[in-house]
Amino acid sequence: MDSVVRSWDAAVERAQERLGSAPRLRAVEEGDDRRFALWDLASRAEGELAEPVDPEELGADAERVLRERLGESGREWPDGELYRRRYWVLDETGGRPVGTVAVDNWTKGPGQLAVSSVYLRRCARGRGLAAATLDEVYRAAIAEGLPGYRLEAHWTWQHAVRYYLRRGLWAVSWKHALGLARMPQLPPYRVAEEDDRLVLLVADGPHGWVPLLAAGREGRWLRLDETAAYRQSDGWVHAFARSTLALHLALAGRPLVRGPQWWAEAWRWADTGEPEGLAYRIERFEQPARTGGSRAGGPRDTGLRGAGSPCAGSPASGAPGVRLGDSGDG
């Protein structure tokens, strides 16, 4: 096992080198720690407090207030962040930072790159920069033999969660936050509405889109039906199809519980698995948001927001500037 871990560590180091040389990324250098921390703070303020903030215009007083309101999640680490490598996302000219991303120095889950701090200034959204950044991370992982990447998103950050699902990420856990992953073992999927049911389909080569699961209603309860293709699917797809459809159901405001007996057992899937486990977790995810004054997400919370003015020195975009990541082209 030690040799496997060392092999993963070496692969992560090589993947970081690939990212450091990518044309649209630039490693955060010594002296930029404070600036990166302010961009991280702006991301959290928008996600947790629903208050868009331009990190380049954030003064000391406003920073202090935001950190106090955010509590532990707004804490700044004065000794830097040695556990991960941070990057600026550059604009189309490759010269000006308009966003951030970070990758841990060790793997998560089954040997995946662990991604965090995915953020774009409002003036840079809707131009495909977030999508291109995540694609770059995925290519770096695959090139070094790692099974893709994984990131976490808070349930209350509805705009980001919706974006990641539209990017085709699978829901793989919900223990502390929503764990979302892109892996070569997991095929492209889509969720379609058919006859008032949500159906999860996967791409299967010459067979096209193959339905695996269908979720409907029985009164106030969920009805979840499996297809023969689901029952014959391999381990990764079989394991994460249910959790992925469950997250789509939650965002659509549909039932997650199949009845009192299932709800009584919901704690059994508090890490991942059956949709009742996600319902169990959502109650806990939303509780601190309600008591702490943050925004509690829900199916009516679409996260649609107008963008700010163009970034100074960056090319203007003709596309409507919309929300943090909640855009088909990121």
Image (cartoon, helix red, strand yellow):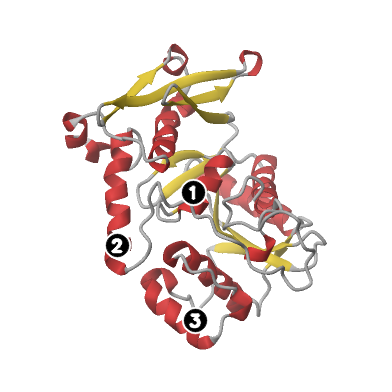
- In this picture, residue 23 sits left or right of residue 275: right
* Secondary structure type for disc 3: helix
Report the residue marked by disc 1.
Answer: 161
Across and down, in percent, residue 325 comes to 58, 54
Tell me which amino acid carries mark 1.
Val
Q: How many marks?
A: 3
The residue located at (67%, 47%) in the rendering is: 329
Report the residue marked by disc 2.
Answer: 290
- In this picture, residue 265 sits left or right of residue 303: left
How far apart are the alpha carbons under marks 2 and 1?
Answer: 19 Å
The residue located at (50%, 79%) in the rendering is: 78
Tell me which amino acid carries mark 3.
Glu
Of the numbered discs 2 and 1, the one sitting upstream in the chain is: 1
The residue located at (56%, 75%) in the rendering is: 38
Across and down, in percent, residue 159 comes to 50, 53
- Disc 2 or disc 1, which is closer to the eye? 2
The part of the image, by quadrant, that contains residue 293 is bottom left
* Secondary structure type for disc 1: helix
Report the residue marked by disc 3.
Answer: 63
Of the numbered discs 1 and 3, the one sitting upstream in the chain is: 3
